[in-house]
Image (tube, helix red, strand yellow):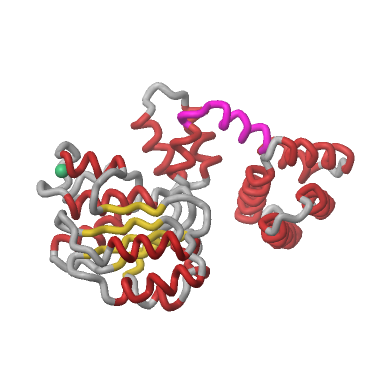
Amino acid sequence: MKYNWSIIGHEKQLKQIEQDFASGNVAHAYLLAGPNSIGKFTVAKKMAGILQCEKDFCHECTTCTQVLKGSHIDTTELKGKDSIKIAEMRKVVEKFSRTGQSKYKILLMQSVERMTIPAANSFLKTLEEPSGNTVFIMTTNNIGDVLPTILSRVRTVKFGNVSLKYLQGKMKELYPDSTEDVLRKVALFSMGKTGKALNLMENPDHLVECVEVYNKVQNFLEYRDVVERFSYVSELVEEERVETFCTMLTHVLRAKILQGDGETMRYIKTLSKIHDSAMLLKKNVNKKLVLENLMLAL
Ligand SMILES: [Zn+2]
């Protein structure tokens, strides 16, 4: 690697980006696409650092520090979970019509699909005809949700989860004092997501919670105790752990399907039910009801 990315995994994708930069073939717009919590926005920020720094992303100069801290004058960040509305987008468009003071004018936009249609429309012209040395670096967890008008104007780099074995090895390097048991569990429960793995290493409570949910899920798949299931649903809803539960359930079922233990069809059906439930849960419906239905289907 030419640059000091300090990123776990994704070597192929980083090399592809390095090649663009080294050959002077920097695209006006990049879309980093792939699952959540694997470090796409971190990669985006590092790309900005590489482009802005005068010394090949030294991590030490003022420019590097400012980019990484998010306070660089010509590196704008649109980060978060809320939708990006037209008023906010207009400000960005206005900013990008002015001349910058740095090597590049960079926009880092997390989850590009957060843009409302009017916001996306107001952004299109700037995306299509960017002034001078502008680079848009955007991310998405779901490329299917990105408007075709955006997609056709970006260079897409696809990211994936990293392998459990690789992740376990990396965590051991970063946390040499951890026990093998912890490292193995962290790799297992982070499901190939580097951000999640780091979070679990830093927060032992979360790891304990994962182990608990994992055991519950295993138990539910073995024993049909509706009362226990429903009382667990109440707990999950109260403690806002519905997402953790659904993710873990998906994870366990996938592992069971891969092992091929004879009930594959049942597990596949359940997976599709989890998917349906997840869609419903996004729509502000009665969470408890959705989960109880899911529990009955296990
Ligand atoms: Zn620097």
The kind of secondary structure the magenta stretch mainly shows is helix
Residue 253 against residue 214 in the figure, above or below: below
Residue 227 in sight in this render: yes
**Residue shown at the point (75%, 55%) measured from the top left:** 285
* Residue at the (27%, 53%) spot, across then down: 75
Q: Residue furthest top?
A: 177
The answer to if 278 sits in the magenta stretch is: no
Q: x, y (%) of residue 229?
A: 82, 41
Residue 241 vs residue 198, the one in the foreground: 241
Q: Quadrant of residue 154?
A: bottom left
Total labels: the figure holds: 0
As rendered, which of 186 and 257 lies closer to the eye?
Answer: 186
**Magenta span includes 207:** yes
Name the quarter showing ligand 1. Answer: top left
Magenta stretch, residue numbers: 201-213
In front: 235, or 110?
Answer: 110
